[in-house]
Image (cartoon, rainbow, N blue to C red):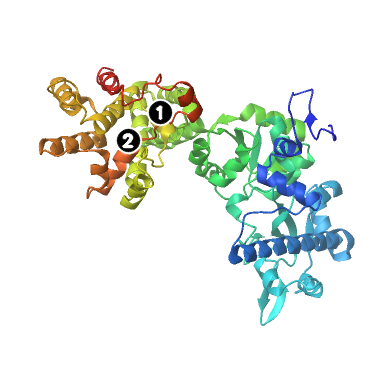
């Protein structure tokens, strides 16, 4: 580190940069998060974009909730470690579970006394706002009296990526059929359950180093594994994985190993997040802990080394596991087997990023072997699901969205579309879309002395029966509509489709038109007159799309 030059250089890995870059690399902060962290550390006020009064109030509320949560954590930890009730009830329970004092302090675990309002009294005495205390979920008001929401429970603080406390999970200790085993902080200005993974603050560096994230269900699973030295682990809190949680994992690694109980409920819970994980381009493996065990009990039973060996030896590819499991359930029922084929094809179609093309093809090959069907047939079914997805996206766009995309300026038409999915379609369909785009853009231009481009393309389609070879019905609809208008004497353009009464057709055309690539000003200036445009080469483009 060179304070004078304000840079760092690692001679081991070769990485270098400034303080902001270091935080982004080491802590996986975004640029804005790194700036805010540095500003807070050195008491530097940063000027942000002008905020509305409502935004200022929301930020003030968020800041207050962080302060309240920090106060609460210290209160609960002090009760656990330094009071007779905390030691006799909370600490003894945690030690029975195998937690030592070091891990308890690391995760800032605590205990809320049994008394009706011990925390509420302390918070009010410290002059914290009662409304915000209720918003935090720490206090509830009953019979006009504030009382503790987590009384008699072990407290698990939930941290964000910077180590700030977002909320709490509270586990009951008494056997009570009426009370839930866990209570979590209600969603508020800082805590959104779908965006949080328990333990991610403590696991982030280990995940980055191991290039793998282990995902478990519960808080105690995370704490036990960390104590055993297995630190690249986080918990979903027993809920289905969400896109935000998966993106949080992807900040550190592309490799996700899900470790769940071996019972049917555990398997189903794991399955729920599979498609989302595949869409985020994560490599997903599954490990099922032996029956009647969970990661917490199993690591305490066999030890860290044996647990790690078990994980390594029992990782199963998630997609293939789902397929094998479904085939086992289907048995000899042909109807159920057919449903399994559709299910696995739809799952594989979720792997739709361009860089994942090889992975998708490998899955198709392996799945076809397990299903004992032709690889080409499964490939076609996967492509069908891809086309259906694209069609749904195209049909989702309303007339207003399509008009806005055109009206912003008479520049290339823009629409949100899954271009990476388009690239995974077979080459035939890519050329078919290009042919339709050619007629939309250049149909009214001259082809020769007697024909326009539209005349030539429709002549080629008819002569070679090309329409029979096009599988995508939407493309056929665009061609037929264009031909109908053209035969009626109209001069169709993309704008004609945009302002037609058929909203879906207009949105489809916007999608087909895609994005034009603009050449930079400097490049154009240097090579002025030497770079041919698509307009100048339209005949070559039309010829290419018709002769693939």
Which mark identifies residue 58?
Answer: none
Q: Residues within 10 Å of mark 2 (few under 14, many from 20)?
A: many
What residue lies at 66% left-to-right and 54% top-to-bottom? 48
Among numbered discs 1 and 2, the one appearing first in the sequence: 1
Q: Nearer the viewer, residue 115 or 364?
A: 364
Q: Nearer the viewer, residue 54 or 423?
A: 54
Query: Residue 515 location, x and y as percent?
Result: 39, 34
Q: Is residue 540 left or right of residue 452?
A: right
- Kindly indicate the quadrant of the structure image that contains residue 315: top right
Q: Nearer the viewer, mark 1 or mark 2?
A: 2
Query: Is 116 located above or below residue 356 in the figure?
Result: below
Q: Nearer the viewer, residue 374 or 294?
A: 374
Return the residue at label 2. 512
Number of numbered discs on residues = 2
Q: Is residue 506 left or right of residue 386?
A: left
Question: Which image quadrant: the N terminus?
Answer: top right
Query: Residue 19 location, x and y as percent?
Result: 76, 38
| Label pair 1/2, CB-CB below 8 angstroms | no
Mark 2: secondary structure: helix
Mark pair 1, 2: CA separation = 13 Å
What residue lies at 43% left-to-right and 26% top-to-bottom? 367
Q: Residue furthest left?
A: 488
Q: Residues within 10 Å of mark 1 (few under 14, many from 20)?
A: some
Residue 153 is at least partly visible in this image = no
Query: Residue 153 location, x and y as percent?
Result: 74, 62
Question: Which image quadrant: the C terminus?
Answer: top left
What residue lies at 62% left-to-right and 47% top-to-bottom? 236
What residue lies at 37% left-to-right and 43% top-to-bottom? 393
Mark 1: secondary structure: helix
Return the residue at label 1. 423
Query: Residue 408 location, x and y as percent?
Result: 38, 47
Q: Is residue 469 left or right of residue 346?
A: left
């Amino acid at each position: 580190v060179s304070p004078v030059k304000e840079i760092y250089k690692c001679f081991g890995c070769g990485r270098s940069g400034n303080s902001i870059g270091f935080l982004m690399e080491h802590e996986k902060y975004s640029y804005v998060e790194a700036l805010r962290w540095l500003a807070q550390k050195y008491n530097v006020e940063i000027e942000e974009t002008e905020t509305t009064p409502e935004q200022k109030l929301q930020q003030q509320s968020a800041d207050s909730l962080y302060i309240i949560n920090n106060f609460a954590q210290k209160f609960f930890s002090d009760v656990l470690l330094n009071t007779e009730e905390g030691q006799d009830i909370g600490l003894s329970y945690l030690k029975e579970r195998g937690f030592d004092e070091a891990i308890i302090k690391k995760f800032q675990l605590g205990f809320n006394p049994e008394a009706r309002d011990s925390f509420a009294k302390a918070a009010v005495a410290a002059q914290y706002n009662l409304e915000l205390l209720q918003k935090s979920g720490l206090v509830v008001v009953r019979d006009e009296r504030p009382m503790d929401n987590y009384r008699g429970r072990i407290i698990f603080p939930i941290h964000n990526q910077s180590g700030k406390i977002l909320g709490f999970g509270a586990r009951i200790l008494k056997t009570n059929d009426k009370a839930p085993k866990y209570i979590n902080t209600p969603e508020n200005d800082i805590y959104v359950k779908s965006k949080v993974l328990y333990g991610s603050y403590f696991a982030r560096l280990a995940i980055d180093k191991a290039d793998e994230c282990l995902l478990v269900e519960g808080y105690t699973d995370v704490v036990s594994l960390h104590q055993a030295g297995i630190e690249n682990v986080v918990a979903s809190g027993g809920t289905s994985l969400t896109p935000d949680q998966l993106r949080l994992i992807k900040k550190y690694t592309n490799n996700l190993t899900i470790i769940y109980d071996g019972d049917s409920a555990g398997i189903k819970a794991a399955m729920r997040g599979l498609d989302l994980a595949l869409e985020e381009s994560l490599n997903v493996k599954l490990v099922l802990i032996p029956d009647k065990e969970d990661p917490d009990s199993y690591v305490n039973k066999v030890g860290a080394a044996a647990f790690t060996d078990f994980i390594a030896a029992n990782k199963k590819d998630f997609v293939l596991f789902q397929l094998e499991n479904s085939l086992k359930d289907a048995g000899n029922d042909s109807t159920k087997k057919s449903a399994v084929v559709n299910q696995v094809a739809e799952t594989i179609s979720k792997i739709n990023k361009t860089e994942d093309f090889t992975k998708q093809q490998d899955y198709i090959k392996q799945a076809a072997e397990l299903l004992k069907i032709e690889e080409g047939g499964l490939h076609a079914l996967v492509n069908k699901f891809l086309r259906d997805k694209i069609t749904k996206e195209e049909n989702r766009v309303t007339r207003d969205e399509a008009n806005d995309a055109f009206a912003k300026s008479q520049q290339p038409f823009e629409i949100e579309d899954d271009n990476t999915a388009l690239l995974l379609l077979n080459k035939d369909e890519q050329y078919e879309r290009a042919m339709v785009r050619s007629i939309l853009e250049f149909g009214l231009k001259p082809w020769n002395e007697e024909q326009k481009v539209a005349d030539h393309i429709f002549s080629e389609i008819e002569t070679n029966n090309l329409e029979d070879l096009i599988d995508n019905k939407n493309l056929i609809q665009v061609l037929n509509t264009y031909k109908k208008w053209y035969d009626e004497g109209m001069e169709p353009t993309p704008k004609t489709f945009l302002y037609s009464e058929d909203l879906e057709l207009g949105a489809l055309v916007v999608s087909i038109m895609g994005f034009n690539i603009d050449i930079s000003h400097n490049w154009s200036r240097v090579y002025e007159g030497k770079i041919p445009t698509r307009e100048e080469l339209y005949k070559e483009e039309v010829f290419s799309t018709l002769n693939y």
